[in-house]
Image: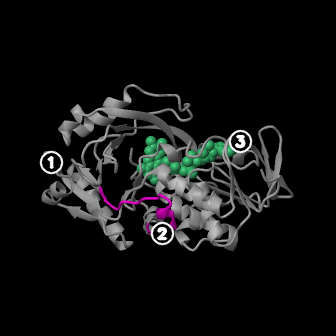
Amino acid sequence: MREEVEVLIIGAGISGLAIAYSLQKRGVKDILILDESYIGAGSTGRCATGIRASFTSKEHVVLMKHSIDLWKKYAAGELGRAGLYYDQSGYVWVATRDESAEFFEKLAKLHNSLGVNTKIIGIDELKELVPPMKVDGVAGAMFDPTAGKSYPFDTIFAFLKLVKGRGAEVVTRVKVTKILTSSGKVTGVEVKGGKIIKAPTVVVAAGSGSRELLGSVGAKLPIENIPRHALITEPYKEAFKPLVIDWDTPGVPYIVQSKEGGFFMGRDVEEKPELPLTSQRIDFMPKAVKPLTKFFPWLRNIRVLRYWVGYYVTTPDHHPVYGPVKEVEGLYIAAGYSGHGYMMGPITGELLAEWILNGKPHIPEAERLTLNRFEKGALIKELAVVG
Ligand SMILES: Cc1cc2nc3c(=O)[nH]c(=O)nc-3n(C[C@H](O)[C@H](O)[C@H](O)COP(=O)(O)OP(=O)(O)OC[C@H]3O[C@@H](n4cnc5c(N)ncnc54)[C@H](O)[C@@H]3O)c2cc1C
């Protein structure tokens, strides 16, 4: 392992790998990525594959729109040839209350004003998009045709192959214990066992480990690591393409079919932050599946193959924390996606590379997401947190 490096990235999830990829495209060669566990062990390997621009905040809509453009570009290029896959099969939002149907109308207007062509759909179109759906009780539906799905392990192994091929060193099973500084500047990190690695630029892309790492330089990162659960069934023949969101059931259950045919399902069940990932819940399966049986009665007969727990690394305003940590020159953060960091991966890479190399990102909305918004009380609201 290198002992001195130009850029050191902590975390080999989608954020860390996408940042390395974007830095390399801009000519940075000397990059070391450290991960305390295996590739994909964090939230990335536990996510539900969803990618969308249909959010309620301008910041999210704008950033996700850029990210989706990159997903498409990446899938069509060298990352696609290395295994990254993006299927733009849309999201269907289903309301059973009239007020929610009205809310969808406002939301679609916001999306359209920002260049995302979300639209309100009638029952016939809903049945066309999701043929095996029972539509009794549906008060309204919205379709986001720009949304889609992509598979986390395909994606991160594609990034890994390319960043390693271009000379980045990626070392697993090495825990960073401390970020080191001198006279207000970052100088490197200390890893478990006491070894020091020198670096003038350090990026914390460490998911649920990010708060502790920033704490080692006295910076406060207001995130909570909240356990979230998901399951996948055995494969079945293709039933429908879009991800379907049951907006009016508390905990917002969702269902999407993978390219292999398994149905992913998830729902937010009340959880205490910071519980370990061994906190499996036997009651999760009925909680996630049962509400969806009102639309898909045949779900009563499906066979669940796997169930798992991961963290939504969550900020008070459900937006990520991006960019420089102002207390320490050369230190950057990309964490706190509150359940949306997989879809943001490509744009995260671009934004952080721009911050590091040019001092600012090219998308103004990203500048509102720096750590100091919490100090300033400049929080942004996001209402459309799913699962
Ligand atoms: C059930 C579930 C469903 C989800 N569904 C979606 C979805 O559909 N769409 C979406 O966009 N997002 C989804 N998410 C959220 C998404 O998974 C995350 O936001 C995203 O993967 C974050 O990626 P990351 O690279 O920032 O962090 P991670 O993938 O968590 O990677 C961080 C890495 O840092 C390493 N690390 C931590 N501390 C240290 C340390 N001290 N030293 C060295 N290494 C360290 C970890 O081992 C880990 O590998 C979901 C999450 C869950 C749990």
State the residue in front, 143 or 326: 143
Query: Which residue type does callout 2 highlight?
Result: Gly
Res 319 seen here: no
State the residue in front, 325 or 160: 160
Q: Residues within 10 Å of mark 1 (few under 14, many from 20)?
A: some
Residue displayed at 30% across by 46% down: 261
Task: Give me the disc on residue 175.
Answer: 3
Q: In the image, residue 366 lies at what x, y percent?
A: 55, 66
Mark nearest the camera among 3 and 1 is: 3
Cα–Cα span, label 3 and label 2: 33 Å
Q: In the image, residue 328 lies at what x, y percent?
A: 76, 58
Q: Residues within 10 Å of mark 3 (few under 14, many from 20)?
A: some
Q: What is the magenta range?
A: 76-91
| Residue 83 included in the magenta stretch of the image | yes
Cα–Cα span, label 3 and label 1: 50 Å
Left or right for 74, reference 140: right
Q: Quadrant of residue 2?
A: bottom right
Q: Residue furthest right?
A: 183
Residue that carries the numbered disc 2 in the rendered image: 77
Q: In the image, residue 179 lies at what x, y percent?
A: 77, 49
Q: Could you tell me if the residues under marks 1 and 2 are in contact, i.e. CB atoms within 8 Å?
A: no
CB of mark 3 near ligand 1 (< 8 Å): yes
Numbered label tally:
3
